[in-house]
Image: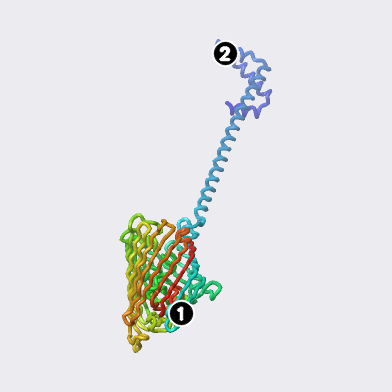
Amino acid sequence: MEAWIGRMSNHLSKRAFAAALLAGASLAGTAMGATGTTAPATTSTMTPAQVQAELQSLQAQVAALKAKEQKTSDSVESAEQVKAIVQEVLKNSKSQSQYMDNQLQAGYDGGFFIRTPNKAFDLTINGYLQFRYSYAGAEGQKPYTNYNTSGFNFRRARLILSGNVFKNFIYCISGDFQTGISGATVGNNNAFAILDTWAGYKFSPAVVVRAGSMLVPFTHVEYFSSGTEFPDFAVAEAPFDPVRSDAIDLEGQIIPHTFNYEIQMNNGSTSQDNGNVGPGGHFGNRPAVYGRINFAGAGRISDFNDSPDLEWHKHLVWLIGAAAGYESQNPFASFTPGSTTAPAGIGTLNGNLTRFTIDAHAKYRGFAFNSAVYAQNIDSAPGTSLIGTGHSSLFETGYYVEGGYFLVPHKWEIAGRYGELLYNRTNQHQYEATGGVNYYIFGQNAKIQAAVTYVQDAQYTNSNLGTTAGSNDWIGQIQFQFKF
């Protein structure tokens, strides 16, 4: 009806529509009269004015219905627009969320890092410096007179970049601003030397392959040189430490956090490209192989990433490690016959080198115990003999034991150490004793260490340790360490 009235109103004039309505009314009245039915008075007796009013009323109703329909149509259109806007917002939000998920993350977690959220790409930046004051007094030096030295210097100033790319490809690039030139220090013979610089692939936690310049898996102390009880290593340890070498390396965890291994083929002791090499550079027919294992009988291997019990373990944790190495025709193998030679005191043998070590560590409620035993046999070249002995080989042994205890948990620690170095081809016998106190400002990240060491009949000269071959040495050190 509404549609019909609308169409009629658009095509007929008001007068034509009124005439049609009057004609319809008359016909209706006639029909009703014929049938004997009386039509309603309002219909049969309507005047033209009334019809006009009725028409206007009907037109008003039609207009109201059109307005309502238009409003409904507008509402539907608005709803569609709102729906489209919401969908667009949701689409943009999802797109923005995905963009945010792919953004790089940065912060500090054991080092400054930049990484993707899934850690498929990661760069961690670490570094530490050790600035110290040292005093070394040599007594009874042979054949020279007594003397002493003192001064400030950097023991280490290192920068380390490490991480992974494509998740399983791992890498490390590190260097030291002091290592490489003997006695180098800031403002005096500055040098930057590449240290641990390698790349590898992690097949699984049990199988990791690396290649490059890296620590030789032998002495345990090399793995926490920034977390020791004293400013420096034991004097008895140095002759057995292969330090670093260019190598290919296989390592992994057989039992997670409990038992791990490392096997390495390399160029021999102190033979990496860091300036610390002997004549002829790092090449030569002298392949070497080393291997090390660690077993944590209680606690985790990571509990022994440093030597003190800084965490104050409530339960006893302990670890045992062992290592062995063989170097063929190494022209740089060191031997230390002590006062039978000049104070520079370290000779070299172009022969085979075999060495072993076993070490033990424990921590409990602020008390830390660390120890190691070393042994090695060095052969001289065919037809030659060891300087000052008349023998073609030298067998050396050494050991140290040390302990530390926190008088104030996490802050104040006292420590002591004793060690010996012995030879079967000479009458030399080196003793050492060290006492120290440490104050941890912010754990290993900031600490101050002070120590006094006495070495009887030092067997070699080492500027870092403060020893002079053939003398009795008093060595004092105060060191500040900053690490991030």
Q: Nearer the viewer, residue 305 or 174?
A: 305
Looking at this rendering, what residue extends furthest in the bottom direction? 383
- The circle drawn on residue 309 is none
Helix, strand or loop under label 1:
loop
Relative to the observer, which residue lies in front, 53 or 152? Answer: 152
Percent x, y of residue 438:
44, 62
Q: Quadrant of the N terminus?
A: top right
Residue 17 image-quadrant placement: top right
Q: In the displayed structure, would residue 386 be above or below residue 274?
A: below
Q: Identify the residue at image location x=34%, y=85%.
A: 389
Q: Name the residue beneath numbered marker 2.
A: 32
Q: In the structure shown, which secondary structural element does the residue marked by tag 2 occupy? A: helix
Task: Tell me where residue 329 sits by quadrant.
Answer: bottom left
The disc, 2 or 1, on the residue closer to the chain's N-terminal end is 2
Residue 148 in view: yes
C-alpha gap between disc 2 and disc 1:
150 Å
Other residues around mark 2 within 10 Å, as few (<14) / some (14–19) / many (≥20): some
Q: The disc labelled 2 sits on which kind of residue?
A: Met
- Asked if residue 60 lies left or right of residue 117, the reply is right
Residue 270 placement (x, y as % from top left): 42, 76
Residue 305 placement, left or right of 180: left
Q: Position of residue 49 (x, y in %)?
A: 68, 17
Neighbour tally class for label 1: few under 14, some 14-19, many 20 plus, Cα within 10 Å = some
Q: Which residue is mark 1?
A: 146
Residue in view at x 38 percent, y 80 percent: 336
Q: Nearer the viewer, mark 2 or mark 1?
A: 1
Decide if residue 302 is in sight here: no
Picture coordinates of residue 164, whole percent (x, y):
45, 63
Tell me the kind of residue under disc 1: Asn
Residue shown at 68% from the left, 23% from the top: 15
The residue closer to the viewer here, 134 or 250, is 134
Vertical position of residue 290 compared to residue 412: above or below? below
